[in-house]
Image (cartoon, rainbow, N blue to C red):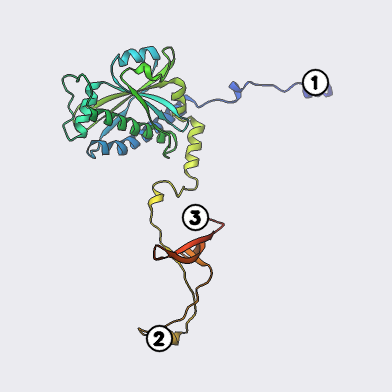
Amino acid sequence: MNMQHSFVAERALAQHCPELTERGPRPEEQAENLAIWRRDAIRNLSGELAPLFMGEKLNITLGEPEQLNGEAIFEKIGDIAVNCLMRCGPGREKILLSLDPITMLALTDRSFGGDGDLPAEAADELPRSAIILVERLASVIAQALARATNGGEPVANAGIIMRSENATRLKAFEIDSECVTLPLEFGSGEKEPWKLMLAMSQDQWAALVPSQSAGQNARAASRGPADPSARPFAEIPLSLEAVLSEFEMSLDRLETLAPGDEIPITTPREVPLRLDARAIAHGAIGTLDERIAIRLTRLSQEGPFA
C-alpha cells in the first residue's frame, strides 16, 4: 500500500491545452447571443430610421446570416450598386452596406413623402437627394448596429467611412476571405419591403456579435453607474441654488414682518452652490455682464452625483 501511494504521489499532473480547458460558447449560447443582438439592433433601427421616413413606424427584419466568400458577395452585388463602407462597433468593425440603385430611388421618394414604390428602372445617375439620404442611412444603420454590440450605449466613431458604386474599391474584405452576409429589410404597411444587404469578413462578424462572456460583460457594464454626461441623463434639468446668506429670526419677529422692513445680512466670502440639500461647490459672488454671478472656487470632493 505504501509503495502504491508513493507512485501515485510522484506522477506528473496532467497538462491540458487551452482548447480543452477554455471552451467558447456552445451553439445554443451563440444562437441566443445572436437573437439578442438582432433584437436590440432592430429596436435601435426602428427608432432611428423613422425620422428619415416622415416619422413612419417601419417593419424591420434582420435575416439569418449566410456564409459566403468575398468573391461570391461581390458577384451578388454586381458591378454597379449603392455601396457604403461603415464603421461599426467599439472595435471599429467594418461592414459593407449594399443596395441596388432602384431601391435607393424608392427610399428617396418615400423620404420626401412619396409612396416609395420601386421604379421600373434606375436613373443613369443618382440625384443629390439620394446621395445625401444614403449617407445618412448608412450612418444611422452603423450606429444602431454598434449600439447593439455595445450594450445599448452610443459609439462615438460609428458611422460611414466612404461610398462607391464599385464594392471592391471599398476594401471591406478580400476576395478569398470567409465572410458573412446579413439581409436587412424594412418597409411600411403591406408594401413590398426595401431590401438591403450587410456583408463583412468572418472576423468582423465575430467581433460584432458578442460572445457569451462579452454579452455578460456588456450587461454587467450596463448595470454600472450611469454617465451623467450621456443621453438621456444629460438633458435632465436640475434646480441649483446659490445660498447668499443664512440667518436666524425669532418667531415673534417673523410674525411682525411687513413690506418695507429692512433685514441686514452678511454675505460670506464663499457661498455654497447646492443641489437639493447638498453643497456640490462653493464660490465667490460677483458680477458678469451687469448681472450677479458666482465664480466657483472649489468643488465638492465627492462630486455632484456621488
Q: Position of residue 125 (x, y in %)?
A: 22, 21
Question: Which residue matches tag 2?
Answer: 255
Q: Which mark is residue 295?
A: none
Mark 3 in CB contact with mark 2 (< 8 angstroms)? no
Q: CA distance from mark 3 to mark 2?
A: 39 Å
Q: Secondary structure at mark 1?
A: helix
Q: Is residue 280 visible?
A: no
Q: Which mark is residue 7?
A: 1
Location of the N terminus (image quadrant): top right
**How would you rate the neighbour count of disc 3 (Cα within 10 Å): few for under 14, some for 14-19, many for 20 or more?**
few
Sequence-earlier tag: 3 or 2? 2
Q: CA distance from mark 1 to mark 3?
A: 63 Å
Q: Amino acid at mark 2?
A: Glu
Q: Amino acid at mark 1?
A: Phe
Residue drawn at the location 31% of the way across and 16% of the way down? 77
Q: Secondary structure at mark 3?
A: loop
Sequence-earlier tag: 1 or 3? 1
**How would you rate the neighbour count of disc 2 (Cα within 10 Å): few for under 14, some for 14-19, many for 20 or more?**
few
User: Foreground: 221 or 168?
Assistant: 168
**How would you rate the neighbour count of disc 1 (Cα within 10 Å): few for under 14, some for 14-19, many for 20 or more?**
few
Question: Which residue matches tag 3?
Answer: 305
Q: Position of residue 35 (x, y in %)?
A: 39, 30
Q: Amino acid at mark 3?
A: Phe
User: Which residue in the rendered view is the most extreme toward the right?
Assistant: 2
Disc 1 vs disc 3: which is toward the camera?
A: 3
Q: CA distance from mark 1 to mark 2?
A: 97 Å
Q: Position of residue 168 (x, y in %)?
A: 37, 16
Residue drawn at the location 41% of the way across and 50% of the way down? 234
Residue drawn at the location 18% of the way across and 24% of the way down? 118
The image quadrant of residue 260 is bottom left
> How many discs appear?
3
Q: Secondary structure at mark 2?
A: helix
